[in-house]
Amino acid sequence: MTLILHQAIVLDRWVVIAALLVAGALWLLRGKQPSPDSGWGWTRTGFGLGVIGIGAWIASAAAGKPAGLGTVVGSDSLATLILERSPAALDWGMLVLVGIPLGSAIAARRRGKSYSKPARFEHVLRAMLGGVLMGLGATIAAGDNVLHGLSGVPLLAVSSFTFML
């Protein structure tokens, strides 16, 4: 069972939500934010991620696995598909796992980014090592930064706040 923030500090959840909203509003009003050189600003990005997060909860619940958005479940599904050759592994988690790089590639194409240079071996090796370390960390933390940040924090899970901090 997950410890929820309002339970940990023994307050009504709406008091905690109101305090977090006030803190967030004060943070947003603290001063003018620099505009990005290209792409979306942080407010548009935050709003977009909020909409995607809500859609992920709805879609994952409709798929029978209400977990929101995260890549650890998809990694587990990918391992099951490869190691056990089980078609049952083609589920919501796998869709998320495949959708992230696919969506990134589409966004890069639309922004005019090209992949004409081949990757250097050192970069590929570093990326693979980083991926393994992130996978180990996500296993230890029972979720990745996406799951904790976009699914756990909105639920006020203490473990997700701890992970994100």
Image: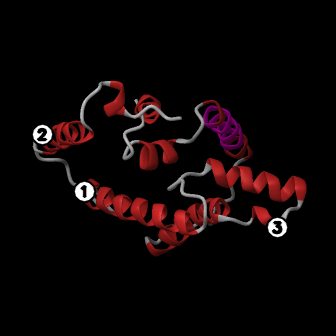
Mark 2 lies on residue: 26
Q: Are marks 3 and 2 in contact (CB under 8 Å)?
A: no
Q: Amino acid at mark 3?
A: Pro
Q: Nearer the viewer, residue 49 or 118?
A: 49
Neighbours of disc 2 within 10 Å: few (<14), some (14-19), many (20+): few
- Point 43% across, 49% down: residue: 150
> Of the residues under marks 3 and 2, which one precedes in the sequence?
2
Question: As shown in the figure, which amino acid type bears the numbered disc 2?
Answer: Leu
Which residue corresponds to the image point at 89% horizontal and 55% vertical from the top-left?
84
* Alpha carbon distance from label 3 to label 2: 49 Å
Q: Is residue 160 left or right of residue 116?
A: left
Q: Image height check: is 6 above or below 79? A: above
Q: Which residue is mark 3?
A: 87
Does the magenta-highlighted stretch encompass residue 137? yes
The amino acid at mark 1 is Thr
Tell which residue pokes out farthest to the top in this image: 9
Q: What numbered label is drawn on residue 43? A: 1
- Say which of 106 and 87 sits in front: 87
